[in-house]
Image (tube, helix red, strand yellow):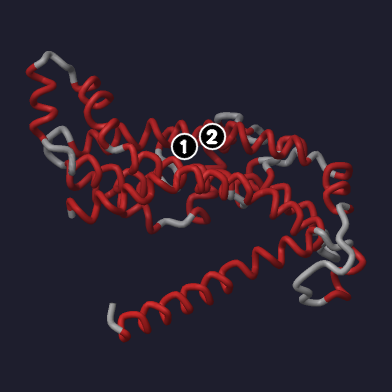
Amino acid sequence: MKMSEKRNQVILYILLTIGAILFLMPIWTVLVISFTSEGQVYTSGSALWPRQPTLENYQRIFKAYPFVNWFRNSAIVTSLYTLGQFISCTFTAYALTHFKYRGRELILGFLLATMMLPFQVQMVPLFLVMTKLKLVNTIWSLVVPAFFGDVTGAVCIFLLRQAFLQVPASLSDAAYVDGANPFQVFTKVYLPLTKPYLAVMVLLSFMTSWNDFSRPLVYISDINRMTVTGGLSFFRTEWQIDWSLTMTGTLMAILPCVLLYVFLQKYFEKMVISSGVKG
């Protein structure tokens, strides 16, 4: 390796290290504050380590608030939401890829156009629908929309459509010759060959539901039915914000997403590699 190449590689590693440190600093600050007592948060400043580490915040958050219920509710909502997104997005992407019919591209364009609509625009109509269905103040108000695409539906549908387009048509033709029906082609050919993309879709759906802060506050008023991210709002009153509990709750709330990403990281790499080779 030439000296210039070594120098460029060293510079690249240094820049990446600096970027990683800058990215991790906010997370480290959250970790430090979670082990800092409420009285010392405003006096310790931007300390890189808690002066007197304590588990007081973790004890308070479980005693003063139904944090276990919030976690359980988030787990149920996220699981059902991810399942709903999986069903609705995979079938829609399959219909937009495998079958040929008039208006298919128009439907795809309409779906992609919905990506430009923020939740704030959809909030009132969806609330009225949930009120008519009598789902307000229940976890089902956070789950039912997923079976119809919901917020990240267009993104996941487009992602899966691009993945299904990479499946050779000869494979589905061979399956039809062997007597398979369209549903069997979908489950036996398309889904097994696009596992990395499906894993990415699952992660996107999981993070969207788990990190959803707005909709639990709109649809749910009972504190015991709240999700973990929506529950963080209870640490803020009209006059002050309990930063110790807020950071402690935030730290515990992001752990499931981090663990899931670590578990599904290999599928991200496979998706990038397959996209680069075939694209």
Q: Quarter of the image holding residue 161?
A: top left
Q: What secondary structure is marked by label 2?
A: loop
Q: Residue at x 56, y 42 (%)?
A: 127
Vertical placement of residue 158 versus 245, above or below: above
Residue that badge 2 annotates: 143
Q: Is residue 180 above or below residue 48?
A: above
Which quarter of the figure has residue 140? top right
Which residue is labeled 1 in the image? 146
Return the mark for residue 248. none
* Apparent side of residue 140 relative to residue 147 in the rendered image (left or right): right
* Image spot of residue 118 (x, y percent): 46, 57
Q: Is 112 positioned to the left or the right of 166 in the image?
A: right
Q: Nearer the viewer, residue 210 or 273?
A: 273
Tell me which amino acid carries mark 2. Answer: Val
Give the tally of numbered discs. Answer: 2
**Furthest residue toward right:** 39
> How far from the left and from the top, in percent, is residue 201?
40, 43
Q: Residue reaching furthest top?
A: 179
Mark 1: amino acid: Ala
Q: Position of residue 192 (x, y in %)?
A: 28, 31
Q: Say few, some or many: other residues with alpha carbon within 10 Å of mark 1 (under 14 / 14 to 19 / 20 or more).
A: many
